[in-house]
């Protein structure tokens, strides 16, 4: 059997680009050049670790990112396959890693907090949950080129993924985990407000207390209208610009990161 071309790739430990991002780029190249066709099986985690001399966490990050973009699909007990873009369900896709990488910058995340809590009445109202519902709450610092940019706290009902662990959040794209249980993002409502950072928020973002920031809220829904995600983020105002493009019937926003 002919060796999968991904296994012949070379990764550079001396590069400023993270190893998992290099692997994402290699797999994308083989897909876009038709070296790998729709339905082709990717090498297993063990094969990639052995051939490329990388850890399982690196492989899982890369595959999670590709799955989040809809380029591959994981099938339980069978492996990871090149996805058919024409059969992807309609919906919204957002990836911090993809957004930052497309700007030629290096993204990373630091998990600060992971816990299961009883949702407050305010969270229940926002997410249209019954009072007393257990939710996951995890807080991450999103870094760009090694510097903190976003302080992000997310809430998800525990019942959508009952056995989630801290390790899974640290080693996988959470959206890719949700795809496995049939949770697909379809629509999202966003809001932005100008705020000044309090002491704890400022310390985590590496700026002075009282610094300006964007307070960003997002509620994400499935196709049948269920809210499964609520995220609150503080974005450093000194590193981000929001641009709006308006034309008949549509308004689009883009973020520029300095």
Image (spheres, rainbow, N blue to C red):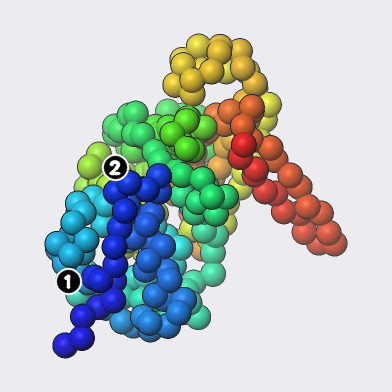
The residue closer to the viewer here, 183 or 28, is 28
Give the image quarter of residue 214: top right
Answer whether residue 136 is visible to the viewer in this image. yes
Q: Is residue 81 above or below residue 186?
A: below
Name the mark on residue 77. 1
At mark 1, the secondary structure is loop
Task: State which tag comes first along the sequence, 2 or 1.
Answer: 1
Judge from the rendering whether residue 219 lies leftward or rightward of residue 35; answer left or right. right
Residue most extreme to the right: 248
- 251 left or right of 18? right
Q: Is residue 133 above or below residue 196?
A: below
Q: Residues within 10 Å of mark 1 (few under 14, many from 20)?
A: few
* Along the line of sight, the residue nearer the viewer: 120 or 74: 74
Above/below status of 11 relative to 139: below
Question: Could you say which disc has been placed on residue 170 in the image?
Answer: 2
Which residue shows up at 65% across the image and 43% down it? 256
**What residue is at 42 percent from the left and 28 percent from the top?**
120
Residue at screen point 50% across, 51% down: 101
In percent of width and height, residue 67 lies at 38, 63
* Residue 160 x, y percent position in the rendering: 33, 51
Residue 238 appears in which quarter of the rendering?
top right
Name the residue rendered at 34%, 34% in the picture: 111
Judge depth for marks 2 and 1 and give the one in front. 2
| Dot 2 and dot 1 residues touching (CB under 8 Å) | no
Q: Report the Cα–Cα distance between label 2 and label 1.
A: 22 Å
In the rendered image, residue 68, in percent from the top left (x then y), is placed at: 42, 60
Q: Nearer the viewer, residue 225 or 71?
A: 71
- In the picture, the quarter occupied by the C terminus is top right
């Amino acid at each position: 059997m002919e060796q999968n071309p991904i296994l012949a790739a070379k990764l550079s430990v001396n590069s400023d680009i993270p190893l998992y991002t290099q692997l994402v780029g290699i797999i994308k190249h083989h897909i876009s050049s038709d070296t790998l066709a729709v339905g082709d099986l990717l090498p297993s985690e063990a094969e990639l670790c052995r051939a490329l001399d990388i850890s399982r966490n690196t492989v899982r990050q890369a595959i999670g990112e590709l799955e989040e973009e809809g380029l591959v699909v994981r099938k339980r007990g069978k492996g990871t396959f090149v996805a058919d873009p024409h059969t992807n369900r309609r919906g919204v896709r957002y990836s911090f890693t993809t957004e930052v990488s497309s700007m030629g910058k290096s993204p990373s995340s630091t998990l600060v907090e992971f816990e299961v809590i009883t949702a407050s009445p305010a969270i229940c109202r926002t997410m249209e949950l019954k009072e007393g519902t257990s939710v996951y709450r995890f807080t991450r610092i999103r870094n760009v080129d090694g510097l903190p940019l976003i302080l992000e706290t997310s809430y998800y009902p525990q019942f959508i993924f009952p056995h989630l662990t801290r390790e899974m959040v640290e080693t996988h794209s959470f959206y890719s985990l949700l795809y496995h249980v049939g949770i697909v993002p379809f629509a999202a409502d966003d809001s932005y407000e100008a705020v000044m950072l309090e002491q704890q928020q400022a310390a985590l973002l590496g700026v002075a207390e009282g610094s300006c920031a964007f307070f960003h809220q997002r509620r994400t829904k499935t196709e049948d209208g269920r809210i499964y995600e609520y995220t609150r983020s503080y974005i450093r105002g000194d590193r981000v610009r929001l641009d709006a493009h308006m034309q008949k019937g549509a308004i689009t926003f883009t973020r520029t990161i300095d």
